[in-house]
Amino acid sequence: MKNLAADRVALNPIQWINVKADPADPGSESLWLFAEPSFRADYPGVLAAIKAAGFASTMMEVLDTQTLQNYKGMVDDAGLTLAPGYASIALPEDHGVTLEPGSAAEVRWYDIIRRRAEESNYFGLDTVFLAPEVWWGDVTVRTNQQVAVGAAFDQGRLNRVIDTIGTAAEILAAEGIRAGLHNHIGTWVETEDEIEQVLAAVPSNLLGASFDVGHLAWAGIDPAAMITRHADRLVDLHLKDLNMTIANATHETPTPYNTATDAGLFLEPGLGDLDLDGVIAALPEAWRGWVIIEVDRASMPPVASADVSWNWVQNRLG
């Protein structure tokens, strides 16, 4: 497929990261291993497995427990190159924080964004996926109670989210990094209207579009139509497949995020119900953005998941 370039396809190592404490028990605790200091010792093996599967690139993800130089050594040793990373910015009031305009605290709220800019520049990347925070607080409606339907929508809150996204995009632009809005279920920007409001409010020279195909479809949005509509500001793309029976059921019955995930919502490309070939065909001609394969929860062991994902890519490279 002419719109899929081998040197612009990467794998997010999330198959190894978002796992169950007991892989044989879907009801066991969900683990996020990037946050575990012990994962640093496992990271080189993960990167080597990504290379062995056939991918030439992986999504940039520097651990909090390592320096840029240490991460570069791991990536170089694996023989990989890097694709753009992911940045998210929280809404202060979700964390009980009030920031005075112009205060030191307000400036420092965006330090994580500056860190992503620094990382990106260090590795020669000039784009980044920019999303609102996926907030897991005890009373959060969109993760713990009702996903994918824009639960508890509040226009005033969305306006504040737009402000934080806009500020983050300005910071990135000042460092030479092009931000793309990344939609994600469980954030305050998950529905089509919310996505469109953000894109309309933040100038396109500051904020492009870096959609997640699966999270669009989960929210009932046609991914190919969304890509076509915003072709002029499309930056990069996350691509995955879904079990749409599970996705559609969450629209009918209030469902927590982890419940849908544990039920087998996320699938490797080609194993679900999405028209991913149609998505690739919808990409602008001669587009040179990144396509990052991201299986939020693998449906099989991580190495097998990477192999299946690469086979899907390889069959479409021509």
Image: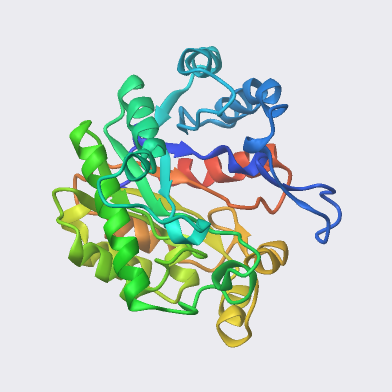
In the rendering, at what x and y percent does residue 259 appear? Answer: 70, 68
Q: Give the colouring mode of the picture.
A: rainbow
In the rendering, at what x and y percent does residue 72 appear? Answer: 47, 16
- Residue 228, picture quadrant: bottom left
Is 124 located above or below residue 226 in the figure? above
Q: Is residue 288 visible?
A: no
- Residue 111, picture quadrant: top left
Q: Is residue 299 visible?
A: yes
Q: Residue at x 28, y 42 (%)?
A: 289
Is 76 located above or below residue 256 in the figure? above
In the rendering, at what x and y percent does residue 268 appear? Answer: 58, 53
Choose between 250 and 225: the one closer to the eye: 250
Q: Is residue 2 left or right of residue 95?
A: left
Q: Residue furthest bottom?
A: 252
Choose between 180 and 44: the one closer to the eye: 180
Choose between 304 and 164: the one closer to the eye: 164
Q: Across the whole image, how many numbered discs are drawn on residues?
A: 0
Q: Residue at x 51, y 73 (%)?
A: 148
Q: Residue at x 19, y 44 (%)?
A: 286
Is 91 located above or below residue 112 in the figure? below
Pick the quarter of the image with the C terminus. Answer: top left
Is 206 located above or below residue 263 in the figure? above
In the rendering, at what x and y percent does residue 91 appear? Answer: 42, 57
Choose between 168 and 121: the one closer to the eye: 168
